Amino acid sequence: MDQREEQEFAEYFAARREAVRRMAYMMCGDWHRADDLAQQAFIAVHRRWRRIRDKEALDAYVRRTLTRAVIDESRKPWRRERAVERLPERPSGDGEVDDSVTTRRTLLAGLRMVPPKQRAVLVLRYLEGLDVAGVAEVMRCSEGNVKSQTARGLEALRAALGDSLGDLRSTS
């Protein structure tokens, strides 16, 4: 890459680093893994920077790369998650926890129990704000697949949240 291309990439990286890291965290539930996954996505973009003609589509390319990395990593035997029977109790003590923080923690705990593909669809649809067609493009699958994965993911999230779902509804 020449100096101009390196500068373009550096500017894109600086502008999007935190957003990609947050999306990775929402998909995997671990900040250390999120850092690694975001780095993998940016390395893939850097390798192909010269060949990417449509710089307006970079966000879509990074989302797709990140989503594939999360799903692929979840298939590794040492990364298989184990669902817990019960979510931890709400923190107790003198300091009150803000309801939005509690809601976020509950949601993240629930998302960790949703299978990786379904979790990716939920994050892309509801947290990244993509429509069904956008998620289908990122995940390279049919819109029908996105709809069924969304339905299954929401069902798994409801099952994971159990009694906490009522708490979420009352705080929103």
Image (cartoon, rainbow, N blue to C red):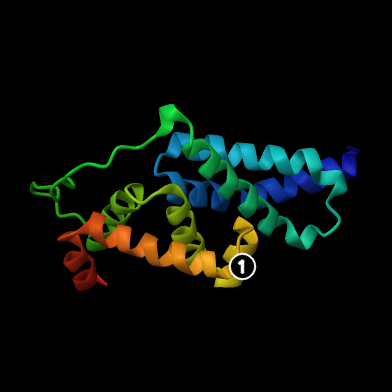
Question: Is 4 on the left-hand or right-hand side of 70?
Answer: right
Question: Observer-nearest residue: 151 or 100?
Answer: 151
Tell me where residue 96 appears, x and y as whole percent: 15, 55
Question: Number of marks in the image?
Answer: 1
Residue at coordinates 61% horizontally, 54% vertically from top-left? 63
Q: Secondary structure at mark 1?
A: helix
Residue at coordinates 82% horizontally, 40% vertically from top-left? 6
Report the quarter where the C terminus lies.
bottom left
Name the residue beneath numbered marker 1. 134
Question: Is 36 on the left-hand or right-hand side of 64?
Answer: left
Residue 27 to residue 167: above or below:
above
- Give the quarter of the image for residue 133: bottom right
Residue at coordinates 15% horizontally, 61% vertically from top-left? 163
Kind of residue indicated by mark 1: Gly
Question: Observer-nearest residue: 2 or 89?
Answer: 89
Tell me where residue 7 appears, x and y as whole percent: 81, 44
Tell me where residue 19 appears, x and y as whole percent: 55, 53
- Give the quarter of the image for residue 49: top right
Question: Is 92 on the left-hand or right-hand side of 12?
Answer: left
